[in-house]
Amino acid sequence: MSRSSRGLIVAVQAMAVALLGSCSDSAAPTGSPRLVFEPAVVALDTAGPATVVIRNTGDAAAGPLEMAASQLRDTAGTTLVGPSVAVSPRDIATLNPGAERTVTLSLTLAPLTQPGRYVADLAVRSQGNTLASLDLDIRVDQEVTGAPGQSVAVMGGPSTVRQGDVAQYTAEVRDSAGAEMNGAVVHWSVVPSTAGVFSAGGRFVGYDVRDVRVVARSGAAADTLDVTVQPRALSGSFTTVGQGSVPARFSADLWVHGGTLYTGTWGGRTVNGVTQFGNALFAWDITNPTQPAIVDSVIVDARVVNDVKVRADGRLAVITHEASGDGKNGVTLLDLSDPHHPSVITRFTNSLETGVHNAWIEGDYVYLVVDGTSATSGLRVLDISNPTQPTVMASFHAGSSFLHDVYVRDGLALLSHWDAGLVIVDVGNGIAGGSPTNPVEVSRVLVAGGQTHNAWYWPDAGYVFVGEEDFATPGIIHVVDVRDLRSPVEVATFQIGGGTPHNFWLDEATGMLYLAWYENGVRALDVTGELMGQLERQGREVAALQYSGGSGCPASVGGGTCAWAPQLKTGLVYVSDMNTGVWVLQPQF
Amino acid sequence: MGFVHVVRGRRWDVVAAALTLGVVGCDDAKLLGPRLYVASGFTDEVLQLDPDNGAVVTSISMDVRRAETDEPHAVAVDPNGRYWYATVAHGEPTLWKFELRGNRLVGRVRLGMAGAGRIGVTPGGDRAFVPDYYRSGGDVRSEVAVVRLADLEVIDRVRVCVAPHDAQVSPLGDVVAITCSKSDEIVVLDVATLEERTRFAVGPDAGLPGAPHYRPLNAVWSPSGERLFVTLHDVATVRAFAPDGEVLGSVTVGDGPAQIAQTGDGRRLTVANRRDGSVSVVLTAALAEEARIPLGVLHPHGVALSGDDSVAFVTYEGDTRSPGGVVAMDLRSRAVLWSAEAGAYTLGVAFAAGP
């Protein structure tokens, strides 16, 4: 049943505040912008969007302006994962003194959003400063189509649940004659309201370890069930096993195969007055993981070798070029017949001149991320059946924003397409008739916050873990339910106090997600079972290690932890660290 | 060399402060005087330099995506002396607008294209033309964005040719010439109607779209608007055209001519020769190379002249083993006045007399 057919009526009330200033020295202009929202109250329902005007009443232009709505929170402050307020336009290039723009707000409800009162805010930011904000008072009402029930009784559901596990509760509603009212709407809540979260349909996940009361309401009738939320009781740690240094360059992505680890390099690093750019691939001998040692390198024409991927058979690798000196960029294919000593097969640049940021190898195809925002940019599929003469077989672009990363699994390419969201493309799965030479979009989901950076698809569980690389607000891991590949929906999030996540690796055998989180090091997150709500409140983080201190990420000299990517191999977690090189960690859970 | 101007990563430490203030060190009196703006394509910043000595006065961050290369590509100064503009070429290409006084960012517009090259501003400062210099599109034609500068509205995008790089508005402001780097063409658009007035090949051996023979990169109009000088990057030549495409002459310059600038009196051209690390000075009347001066740097790219045409400021890209920078050369004596490392993959350059 669609949201509208369920008769949901949504009301949003909004209140505005504003402000800010800028550089006030003698070189700066004397004026300053002042932004205000008008009117102060806006009503909105799902039948159509509402509008608000933002006006610059100051005496200087403001811009660029970015409009962003927060996640919805219930009146107790608990964040809802799934429903969101869409804002259009999301950015305004500039707003001159006296000028105004109309901003449209519309509410998107997740399938299991419960009726109720919620709050959110709309912020207008420029260069990291909030210039104005709008408080949103959101009411989601359930249209009453029949007489409310005279009685309700909680009929099913556990009285003891483990923190973070999703429990199903059911209730029975009867009318004044005692007849069961099939289809009657039951509103579920928990007391105290911050101790967990319900979705419509009686699905509950407990956050706080304590005794709570589950409440089922239908009209004026209610029933309760006392429930104990028990601790998830997971614990663990990382122990440093080994470390290998790359002091002269910043390190980038890594890949481990057999007894060899490969790392890319990134940016420009100045040490003792000498600047070295990311023009190298390093091969490491890790047969003794306590002493990873660089045994060879490949120097290419690039300032960033962002990514390295090794084919499953271990015989071939691809590395990416950005900001090359000759302007041709592209990729270099490497022969790994001697894994410790890769040799160049060829450099391929055709149609890749603007730069390749990430790559994935699947058999005879290499999937490449080519910079750009047009139909001729984005995903390139390269046939490498003859690796000395690669051929571009296909391209795909999602129509807006730019492609940042690609992950291929089960004939599906999971495209992290920045502000266009996560885009699922059939490249041989069959669900949409696609193939490597004819990629066909299956579906897409715009996760809250955009900036979709990377993804890991876990077919057995039906989830995709999506990284949002946001250095400002800060970044979040989004969990997208793809059990119906044609209708992906965000169901859970994970965030920590600050910083932004980068790459991750999932141990699917144990359900442990290893996250590189820049200056916040490496985290291990239990993602077993059904995932719902805010994972950081569910006792799911098992271990975290800031293995090299915490100051400067990245920093040429004296920097601390700066984790780029983890990879699990033979029970050890290998981590590429921008500042220091490679760390080998032993997880103990 | 200043650490902050080369090392992307370390720069993160000051980005927050830079964004808060709009600039770094905004109380420096140098901010008010004549200045050079240079685009550091790899460190995602525009540097304001002191034109007297090349010292970095301030750094203006254009680092939209902190962990990626955004590539500030071109800079241009508003003819009215109030603003300056810059393009970002990667990620989601954008045109940025700054106040000349204080370098305060006042706007940024997404161009809706895959790339962004140089910025052609009309003489009145009301419009800008920004070509989509997208080089990975094979033989597919790209667009030129037309931006109304008062409110940064993209009012049109005109599909022109493969990988257009430069857009130069004529002195009268009636036409804009687009250099088509990968189709060996010049496209001339009517500024008012945006209709194509003419399109011509830059030589008899023009390559197929996507496979150029000449690679026209940049252009400059003579003061009268009667001649258009175009650098042909792959054949070490500057060629002069009439507005209708008639070839008026050619001159051999150093290998890999990139940007080109002209003195206000129209008598000389200065050409940055990317491949051989030199600058050519060309007499326009005779269309003859007057001098070729080795700069001793890697990959000269951009060129701008001081307000009195006495000094040429030439950016150089460096390479994957060395940073970029700027060389100032006295156009009369041909002496190098100063040379300063500044940024990395240093591209566009513009001179401003100050607000």
Image (cartoon, coloured by chain):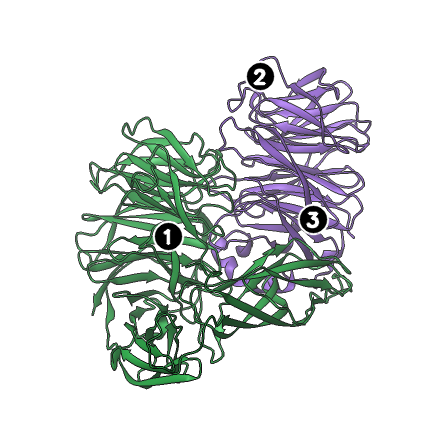
What type is the residue that disc 2 sits on?
Ala
Q: Colour of chain A?
A: green
Left or right: A196 as drawn, with respect to A324: left
Left or right: A180 as drawn, with respect to B7: left
What type is the residue that disc 1 sits on?
Ser
Evaluate whether label 2 is on the same chain as label 1: no
What chain does badge 3 belong to? B
Q: Label 2, on which residue?
A: B206
Q: Label 3, on which residue?
A: B152
What chain does badge 1 belong to? A
Q: Report the Cα–Cα distance between label 2 and label 1.
A: 43 Å
Task: Examine the rendered structure and indicate whether residue B244 appears above or below residue A294.
Answer: above
The chain displayed purple equals: B
Q: Report the Cα–Cα distance between label 3 and label 1.
A: 38 Å
Q: Which of labels 3 and 2 is toward the front?
A: 3
Image quarter (top left, top right, bottom left or bottom right) of the N terminus of chain A:
bottom left
Question: In terms of image quadrants, where is residue A100?
Answer: bottom right
Q: Which of labels 3 and 1 is toward the front?
A: 3
What chain does badge 2 belong to? B
Q: Position of residue A187 (x, y in %)?
A: 41, 76
Q: In percent of the image, x 24 and y 74: which residue is there?
A: A234
